Amino acid sequence: MVCSALIAGSSYPIFKRTVAEIPAMPFTLMRFALAAAFMAVALRVSGDRQTIAPADRKRLWLAGILVVPINAGLFIFGIQWTKAAHGALLYALTPAAVLVITSIQSRRLPSPLAWVGAGLAFAGVLVLLLERGLSFEWHALRGDLLILIAVFAWAWYTALGRGLTASYGAVGTAARAVLYGTIAFAPFGLLFWGGFDPRTVSMVAWAGLVYLAWFVAGINFILWYWGVKQLSPAGVAVFANLQPLVAAGMAWWLLHEALAPSFWLSVALVLTGVAVTQRAAQAAVRASS
């Protein structure tokens, strides 16, 4: 899950840079076409030949629609209309969103310890982003709202993975969700393809597209569902709060930006929140067994 956070944490500035040259709908279509090809190879290499039960096929289609047209589609528009820091902060709500969705599914309230862990991790992200100049502006509100919907779609996708990965594994579940989601998105991507000229796109943007397809929507999606299978949806979701820390660390390493003392407070809060949430998830597993 730390590897997943490293991959995802690097994606925010790459998203901003790439969609500056490639329109949102063609970008998303090409990204997930490349990701679907990657997933097809991953399925073949893994030797997956499982027969999917009809009920599970419907859930896989739902997971695909949630993760590609809704999550990725809305995020790519939202990130153009708001700041990358806003996107990072809203994605820090992922653990809370997962707790809400899993409690609705199970009809049981999450433990207070789980909420404490999610709250600590979110507080750590808020401290970091406030230090880095987070501000709320009305003109960015539409982008924030789209990303918030995308966050809840990602949370639902995460919650769906618990049962599916138990039956089909991380590769089988993530690959089929991406394949189905790409099929569902393709008509919209093609509808808005007109006017896009690939010849105007720089090599830097093409490289960004490939990274966002194969690493973020390929390897990272598999890692995410592997974590869901090994831990729990809530236990995995809290790792999303590591992403802003990764982004800040990369800015220090690559851009030589100074790390304020509040950065270490953020690290302490996020890591404590991760530990508390993991303890709550373990306690829930013991209680149900």
Image: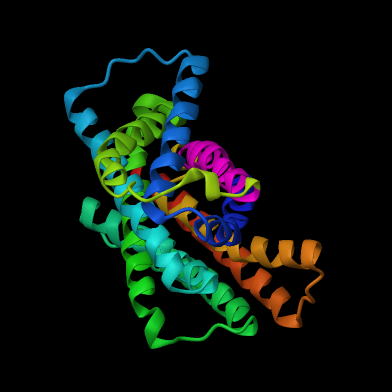
Residue 261 screen position, x and y as percent: 76, 81
Q: Quadrant of residue 150?
A: bottom left
**Total label count?**
0
Main secondary structure found in the magenta portion = helix
Classify residue 60 as left or right of residue 231.
left
Q: Report the quarter where the C terminus lies.
A: top left
Q: Nearer the viewer, residue 234 or 155?
A: 155
Residue 172 screen position, x and y as percent: 41, 26
Q: Where 140 falls versus 116 (above or below)? A: below
Asked whether residue 110 is in view, the answer is no
Q: Nearer the viewer, residue 8 or 186?
A: 186
Residue 40 screen position, x and y as percent: 44, 23
Classify residue 132 as left or right of residue 48.
right
Asked whether residue 153 is in view, the answer is yes
Classify residue 26 as left or right of residue 254.
left
Residue 162 screen position, x and y as percent: 36, 40
Q: How is the image coloured?
A: rainbow
Residue plotted at (35% across, 67% down): 148
Q: Where 10 falls versus 164 (above or below)? A: below
Q: Is residue 142 magenta?
A: no
Q: Nearer the viewer, residue 212 or 89?
A: 212
Residue plotted at (37% across, 12% down): 49
Q: Quadrant of residue 271?
A: bottom right
Q: Nearer the viewer, residue 212 or 191?
A: 191
| Segment tinted magenta in the rendering | 204-227
Q: Where 272 falls versus 58 (above or below)? A: below
Residue plotted at (54% across, 78% down): 126
Residue plotted at (46% across, 86% down): 136
